[in-house]
Image: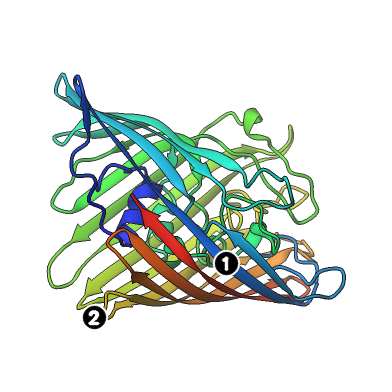
Amino acid sequence: MKTKLSLAVAAALLAGATSAQAAGGIVAGDWTFDIGGNVNAFYIYNRSTDSNTIAGGLTNNEDSKGNSGASSINTGLLPSWLGFTGKTRQNNLDVEVAISIQPGASSKASLGGGGGEEHRQAYVSFGDKSWGTILIGKNLGIFGRDAILLDQTLLGVGSQGAVGTAGGTTTTLGRIGTGFLYADFNGQINYTSPNMNGFQFVVGIDQPLGTTNLGGEASLGASGSQRQPGFVGKASYDFAGDVAGKVWVEAKSQKVDYTADIEDTAHAIGVGANFNFAGLGLTGYYYNGDGAGTTAWLMDGMSADGKARDSDGGYVQAMYTIPSGTKLGVSWGISNLDEASGEDGGTLVKENEMTTVGAYHPLTKHLNLVAEYSHVKSKNHDNEENKSSIVSAGAIIFF
């Protein structure tokens, strides 16, 4: 397989196009099968200060003994990935199936058996370039997809977030929750239009999700009780030339039955742009939500009495490729969560902010060496802060 080692390859993996970079494949009857993926691991040192209670904060705290530093070896933001894709052309339709597994790289204790294992992708798609494509199954979500695929930490670590200083989960968080809502891997049915001179749109429905509340109130509206799916759409324009890139707008909404007496509709919009010229890449993204929550869809989006919380955030990023091929990147982003009407948020997270600098060097066409530094700050509505400084170094290889 010929795999170009870049953010585009990582993007293809997360987006589900594991065979997009392959030159050929295994022919079996009418089908062509490909296997692709990546393996990555990083040494991570996290120095955290303060131990304030910030429900939904993405920093880590000092431990019970007051120690501020901790080490771990873990997979980065992009999961280690093994994907299988099959394609065929039948009855004037391009048909594709994909399924993948994502093993973790960290264990929590002796005889722990290693990290967790996930199955993020299983879908079928069919269509034709003349009228578009329909996808049915589990894949990376549409809302927030471009924001995460263009994030420099996709090849690295970013924030440890829910991983904690001890490691033990499948991936780190990258910039999730410090500039965009996680697109997640959800069940979905969507239609993608044909490419019309660079313009393209996607519309569809998502598996409805329940709330995840970290601010002390009970989690309400489990996904099984939701009567309506989520609705999502995106329009984008890609352009090439001396200046290449894309611009996009996106939206998502979902009616949530919180209790028998409380229901509301969560919704969010996003807008982004990416420009590339003379080795320099610039990316900007902004989102705004009502009841959509922070970090992930519907996380802390509703108060205990069923009132929606407003949220917004975004990030800016610059990447420059020097003559050796090394990509140098710097980015800053923030995610804000407001109190609901009449609410005293207290220890509920108010903002998660992160600045990242990193170097991503292609040692071979398949292997990247990565070094990053990220400074994360979380604040609650009592204006108490925690801070984490995260240094990481490791490698990621595509095949």
Q: Residues within 10 Å of mark 1 (few under 14, many from 20)?
A: some
| Residue 361 in sight here | yes
Residue at the spot x=47%, y=49% of the render?
80
The residue furthest front is: 111
Which residue is at 58% across, 28% downward?
Answer: 227
Q: Residue at label 2?
A: 323
Write down the residue under mark 1.
43
* C-alpha distance separating marks 1 and 2: 27 Å
Say if 385 sits above or below 178 in the image: below
Which residue is at the front of the view, 279 or 271? 279
Residue 13 shown left or right of residue 267 in the figure:
left
Which residue is found at the position 64% from the left and 39% from the top? 210
Secondary structure, mark 1, is strand
Amino acid type, callout 1: Tyr
**Residue 137 in view, yes or no:** no
Q: Nearer the viewer, residue 25 or 178?
A: 25
The quarter of the picture where residue 65 lies is: bottom right
Q: Residue furthest bottom?
A: 322
Query: Mark 1 or mark 2: which comes first in sequence?
Result: 1
Tell me which amino acid carries mark 2. Answer: Pro
Residue 235 in the image, given as x and y percentages of width and height:
30, 51
**Residues tagged 1 and 2 counted as in contact (Cβ below 8 A):** no
Which residue is rendered at x = 79% and y = 50% of the image?
217
